[in-house]
Image (tube, rainbow, N blue to C red):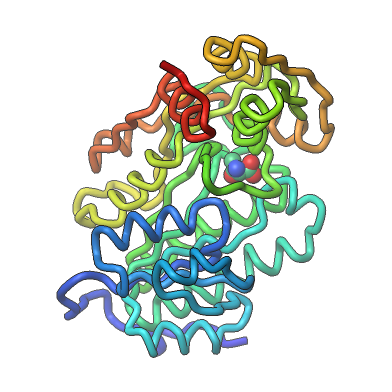
């Protein structure tokens, strides 16, 4: 293991001009492909490289550059960054909350050791680095309503602990080595054409599929479990906006972002306005329920709104009509 020394790292100033050359790790998860599409529209198809350790489906492979990248293999990662003249790195490789509790040592390796590799390579090669954080970086002793950016963070999951670590390490590298680190704490993200995996907020994705295909859904959280949420288009736009924002606009490097908060019961009622036969039942998963009960019910994202102009487009009604129509349901 290499320990960082000042000599390894370039100064923060960059002579690069033109569009960024982007690498996305963990690109076959819930957000990678959508993010690649957004960034390819903006910066050109060949300037955005998607990567993962899994074999991509053919539509992913055909829509732009894809490479194998294992964040636990520092040499492999460095080679990709150097050979492709990467200037922006968006680091999505991670095990989510419930998956992390099911395999703590893998989560520790991917979420913490993987992050160390990414941080060092980003600092060595003067990259702009984005790492997503999460509402899971808060815990039972954090304020639960309108949780501010700066508050107690004592999460009880390995996922949460690894994300607090990522926030602090990124901010430390920014301060110590001039690394251009940018981080958003995402709420639960709801998308139609890509599935999450191993998360606590996953129910809010699956419910739309089951409502349209089966007219019913069995929820693994209690009906009154309120969590912060966001539609995927808002989440990806927030990410692009924070990456493009001038560094001078930041008063900090890790921002809360949110759009809405709802419970399974409220979501089901909104879906039933368009799918009258829809019925929700409950079979609580104790692991996921305990995780959800330790998370904020709403986030205060006023600093993101003030500093770099964050504004969400989708509230609950628009989220539901959009998701239902993407699943082929007529909501007119
Ligand atoms: C999860 O549920 O683990 C994630 C998250 C909120 O970070 N979707």
Name the side, left or right, on which 300 lies relative to 70.
left
Q: Is residue 136 shown above or below 313?
A: below
- Residue at image position (67%, 15%) is 278
Quadrant location of the C terminus in the rendered image: top left
Q: Is residue 231 shown above or below 247?
A: above
Can you give x and y, in whole percent of width and height, for residue 181 in the image? 37, 62
**149 vs 36, nearest the viewer:** 36
Viewer can see residue 153: no
- Residue at image position (45%, 26%) is 319
Quadrant for ligand 1 reads: top right
Query: Which quadrant of the structure image shows residue 127?
Result: bottom left
Can you give x and y, in whole percent of width and height, for residue 192 in the image? 52, 40
Can you give x and y, in whole percent of width and height, for residue 45 in the image? 31, 69
**204 vs 86, nearest the viewer:** 204
Query: Which quadrant of the structure image shows residue 178?
Result: bottom left
**234 vs 291, nearest the viewer:** 234
- Residue at image position (55%, 51%) is 30
Name the side, left or right, on which 149 lies relative to 212.
left
Quadrant location of the N terminus in the rendered image: bottom right
Can you give x and y, in whole percent of width and height, for residue 93 in the image? 57, 63
Q: Is residue 64 shown above or below 188?
A: below
């Amino acid at each position: 293991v290499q320990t960082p020394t000042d000599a390894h790292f370039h100064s923060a100033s960059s002579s690069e001009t033109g569009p960024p050359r982007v690498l996305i790790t963990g690109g076959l998860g819930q957000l990678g492909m959508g993010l690649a599409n957004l960034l390819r529209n903006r910066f050109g198809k060949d300037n955005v490289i998607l990567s993962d350790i899994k074999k991509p489906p053919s539509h992913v492979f055909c829509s732009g550059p894809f490479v194998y990248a294992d964040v636990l293999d520092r040499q492999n990662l460095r080679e990709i960054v150097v050979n492709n003249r990467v200037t922006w790195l968006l680091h999505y490789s991670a095990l989510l909350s419930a998956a992390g509790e099911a395999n703590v040592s893998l989560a520790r390796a991917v979420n913490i050791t993987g992050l160390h590799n990414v941080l060092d390579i980003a600092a060595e090669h003067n990259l702009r680095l984005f790492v997503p954080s999460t509402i899971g970086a808060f815990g039972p002793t954090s304020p639960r309503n309108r949780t501010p950016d700066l508050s107690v963070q004592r999460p009880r999951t390995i996922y949460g602990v690894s994300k607090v670590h990522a926030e602090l390490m990124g901010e430390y590298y920014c301060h110590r080595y001039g690394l251009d680190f940018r981080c958003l704490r995402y709420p639960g993200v709801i998308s139609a054409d890509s599935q999450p995996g191993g998360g606590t907020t996953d129910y809010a994705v699956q419910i739309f599929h089951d409502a349209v295909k089966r007219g019913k859904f069995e929820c693994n959280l209690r009906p009154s479990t309120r969590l912060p949420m966001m539609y995927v288009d808002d989440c990806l736009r927030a990410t692009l906006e924070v990456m493009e924002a001038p560094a001078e606009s930041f008063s900090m490097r890790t921002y809360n972002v949110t759009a809405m908060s709802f419970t399974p019961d409220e979501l089901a009622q909104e879906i039933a306005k368009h799918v009258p036969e829809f019925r929700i039942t409950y079979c609580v998963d104790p692991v996921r329920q305990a995780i959800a009960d330790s998370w904020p019910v709403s986030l205060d994202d006023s600093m993101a709104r003030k500093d770099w102009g964050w504004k969400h487009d989708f509230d609950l009604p628009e989220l539901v009509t959009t998701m239902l129509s993407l699943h082929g349901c007529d909501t007119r």
